[in-house]
Amino acid sequence: MASFKLFLLPGDGIGPEVAGEVERIIDWFNMQGIARFEIERGLVGGSAYDTHGKAISEEDMARAQAADAVIFGAVGGPKWDKVPYDVRPEAGLLRLRKDLGLFANLRPAICYPALADASSLKRDAVEGLDILIVRELTGGVYFGEPKTITDLGNGQKRGIDTQVYDTYEIDRIARVAFDLARTRRNKVSSAEKRNVMKTGVLWNEVVTRVHAESYPDVTLEHVLADNCAMQLVRWPKQYDVIVTDNLFGDVLSDVAAMLTGSLGMLPSASLGAPDPKTHRRKALYEPVHGSAPDIAGKGIANPIAMIASFAMAMRYSFGLGDWATKIETAIANVLAQGLRTKDIAAGGEAAISTGEMGRAILGELKKA
Ligand code: IPM
Ligand code: MG
């Protein structure tokens, strides 16, 4: 039986609550002998700051490096609003992405039929929606230097962030997008701001070249990132795979998430380059939503994005794509049965707890 090392970083806020529901499913997989998952647990974000004075400890970074997959909950909260910038909760997540080389962030937005009415868009616009945002995750303005605030000495300060992309960074993320498009509806939309940004000009140039050289069978279109945002709320079904940089990807994926009914629904996978010898990719799986401090500790958070993120781990890290599909089907089934957490309950519908939703999904999975 295949055996995998999981490193669990539940984090802050609702992170531990939704991660708990994934552990329930992992325990069941272990009991059934579907695979052998060894779980280690660590601290990240505010909870790591409270214990270690930084957003992730060196020991936990080493554990993340050694794991077959990191399962990440969420970080942040008002409690840590005033901690120094370098050790703010988000720094833990950014360091994991950067040090593990997780350059490819896959954010699928699927509108489950049962939830089409929970979307802020009309049913017609979102029913059957299935798009994939491929976000570059280790470059761009998130990591570019200089990144400073300097005192100009005249009562003014200057804040600088640097957007920087090298050819190889655009080349490799474009290839991920084209490869995935071939397994779907064979279309890639590349979003940048070439009308304003030099990185956008280069992005456009490199994606065009990669397409012509290696993927002429895939349909490629270029779209300005602002127009892409508008098109996503106008008629999202025109898209299949959207490939874009770190910052635009952050924004566009939140938009895409709401199309599906709730931010509580969107999973993500962050993948590194395959190791030349083992072909293994470093990987981190996390819901797109944040730590939702306003509802933390109440047991009402939606665990679906977290559970669907684990399904992505089954597919992309463990070679258990059949079980990934079974988890996704279990999610669709509980939604079709009318089970709703608060975030996706329409006016008047009764809401169930995080634990009830997790148990219901596991119940469906057991029937698969
Ligand atoms: C995301 C989040 C992060 C980001 C934050 C928490 C640093 O918004 O994963 O989308 O900006 O990338
Ligand atoms: Mg975001």
Image (cartoon, rainbow, N blue to C red):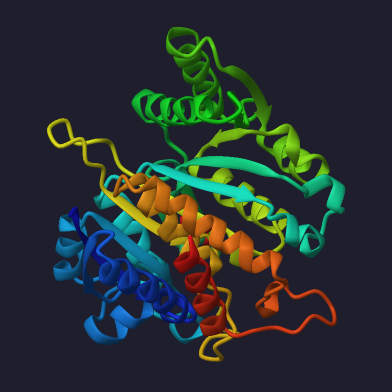
46 and 72: which is toward the camera = 72
Q: Is residue 24 above or below residue 178?
A: below
- Residue 244 location, x and y as percent? 54, 36
Q: Position of residue 310 (x, y in %)?
A: 41, 60
Q: Is residue 351 visible?
A: yes
Please say if 31 is above or below 34: below
Please state if 272 lies on the left or on the right of 269 as rendered. left
Q: Is residue 43 left or right of residue 167?
A: left
Q: Residue furthest bottom?
A: 298
- Residue nearest the observer in this picture, 232 or 125: 125
Which residue is at 49% across, 80% downward?
Answer: 14
Count the numbered circles shown.
Answer: 0
The N terminus lies in which quarter of the figure? bottom left
Position of 210 compared to 43: left or right?
A: right
Q: Residue at x 58, y 33 (%)?
A: 241
Looking at the image, can residue 152 be seen?
Answer: no
Residue most extreme to the front: 367
Above or below, 366 against 275 in this view is: below
Is 131 rendered above or below residue 177?
below
Q: Quadrant of residue 239?
A: top right
Residue shown at the point (60%, 67%) measured from the top left: 264
Where residue 309 sits, quadrant-wise, is: bottom left
Residue 34: percent from left, percent from top: 28, 59
